[in-house]
Image: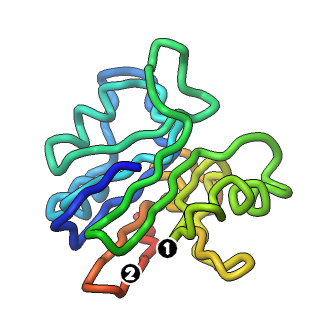
Amino acid sequence: MREINNISKIGIISDTHIINASESLPKKVHSNFKNTDLIIHCGDIVSPHVITELEAYAPVIVVKGNMDTQMLELPTDEIILINGTHTICVSHGSGSPFGLTHKLYKQFVQYNPSIILFGHTHIAGDFEYNGVRLFNPGSPTTRADYYSIGLIHIKGKTLTTNVIVI
């Protein structure tokens, strides 16, 4: 488990699927992430230059998605203790979107998570399953119905999430 302190705002992003180094993230990603303390990418970055682009704003934690190549040495999941209070579990997710919520729940329930972050579906969501909160920021570049990212605000024991449509 990774421990990080003094965090009040976390940018959440997934499924950027940017292939060419000449491509960059949408401007609204930059404007929303410029005052973050940490950025978590829930996989399918595809090109490592996306990490470099995000690191201009805050430290970045990335998990491997199903579209990330073998040359990207990334963990498949992360468990992060934020400010000694909030356990954030991160995975890209895999396989069919049907049953994904239960699969993620089973994978992380033993850590008593404050929230489980994931991607894979390209569809933003913020919901509870068996008493555990799950959050998917959607995708800023690969459209489902809209492009989106997420923010988490932390104040003491309170964790607030927002899906940001960009």
Looking at the picture, does residue 17 appear above or below residue 124?
A: above
Q: Would you name the residue on which mark 2 appears?
A: 159
Position of residue 30 measured from the top left corner of the image (x, y, whole percent): 23, 53
What is the quadrant of residue 86 in the picture? bottom left
Residue at image coords 28%, 44%: 60
Q: Is residue 73 visible?
A: yes
Residue at image coords 54%, 26%: 68
Colour scheme of the rendered structure: rainbow
Position of residue 79 measured from the top left corner of the image (x, y, whole percent): 46, 52
Position of residue 1 measured from the top left corner of the image (x, y, whole percent): 41, 49
Does label 1 or label 2 sit earlier along the sequence? 1
What is the quadrant of residue 124 in the picture? bottom right
Position of residue 33 measured from the top left corner of the image (x, y, whole percent): 24, 59
**In front here: 63 or 86?**
86
Q: Amino acid at mark 2?
A: Leu
Q: Would you name the residue on which mark 1 appears?
A: 114
Residue at image coords 39%, 21%: 20
Please state, as top left, top right, bottom left or bottom right, where the C terminus lies in the image: bottom left
Do the residues under discs 1 and 2 have CB atoms within 8 angstroms? yes
Q: Is residue 141 visible?
A: no
Crowding around mark 1 (Cα neighbors within 10 Å: few <14, some 14 to 19, many 20+) is many
Q: Amino acid at mark 1?
A: Ser
Real-space CA distance between mark 1 and mark 2, rounded to the nearest whole angstrom: 8 Å
